[in-house]
Amino acid sequence: MAGCTSRCRQGFLKLIQSLQRLVSGTLSKDKVDDELEMTMVCHRPEGLEQLEAQTNFTKQELQVLYRGFKNECPSGVVNEETFKHIYAQFFPHGDASTYAHYLFNAFDTRNNGSIKFEDFVMGLSTLLRGTVREKLEWTFYLYDINRDGFINKEEMTEIVRAIYDMMGKYTYPALKGDVPKQHVDAFFEKMDKNKDGVVTLEEFVLACQEDENMMRSMQLFENVM
């Protein structure tokens, strides 16, 4: 069982790295073809055409991603422990566990403690190739920890603090404990238009679209992918 979990971790990490190359364009079409030809079993999940229609990935890209996902994680799902282990490797100087927990929950749209291939691809399609509005809606969902349709200061502070913890002391050597709270207070001052103590989706989107610096700050997933 431990060997299977370790293999899944390593494989999923390779899958994410391949996806990064697909998105950046450094994984060429010929390379994609080669990887497909090397597959012993051609995985063709039901609904591949539907996924192509629902995402911004091509059918060929989906085939490569599905092959890697299924070959390395035969169970077809990734649990939170594996997800956290992967993120820890990307950020060795900090503690990525809390941010990975929240990010995992955002991908786990079924709230069943696991991420299926469909969940993974749908989320990444939005984050990496979606419109500005779609990316902001997904980011809002990440910050809305209790899923009540609003973001309060406590929720935003939790996410921002998790980011600082993940980046580590080498990135922020002189960071004081109250800096995340100061940043959240500044964000809320701009976002909470009606001063009711919570931020709605429309307030969130509008504030980010009006302020380019805030847009970059709030789309944290893209900065740490």
Image (cartoon, rainbow, N blue to C red):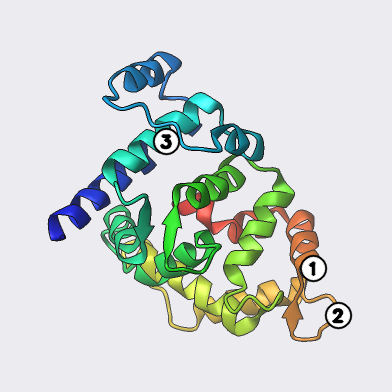
- Is the residue under label 2 in contact with that under label 3 (CB below 8 Å)? no
User: Which residue extends farthest top?
Assistant: 30
- 215 vs 14, left or right, is right
Q: Amino acid at mark 3?
A: Leu
Q: Which label's residue is closer to the chain start, 1 or 3?
A: 3
- Is the residue under label 3 in contact with that under label 1 (CB below 8 Å)? no
* Quarter assignment of residue 193: bottom right
Q: CA distance from mark 3 to mark 2?
A: 44 Å
User: Label 2 belongs to which residue?
Assistant: 194
Where does the image place residue 178, in percent across and percent down from the top left?
49, 83
Where does the image place residue 59, in percent across and percent down from the top left?
54, 27
Is disc 3 placed on a helix, strand or loop? helix
Relative vertical location of residue 191 with respect to residue 91 in this rendering, above or below: below
Q: Residue at x 60, y 33 (%)?
A: 52
- Is the residue under label 1 in contact with that under label 2 (CB below 8 Å)? yes
Where does the image place residue 45, in percent across and percent down from the top left?
46, 37
Q: Amino acid at mark 2?
A: Asn
Q: Residue at x 37, y 61 (%)?
A: 171
Where does the image place residue 202, in percent across and percent down from the top left?
80, 65
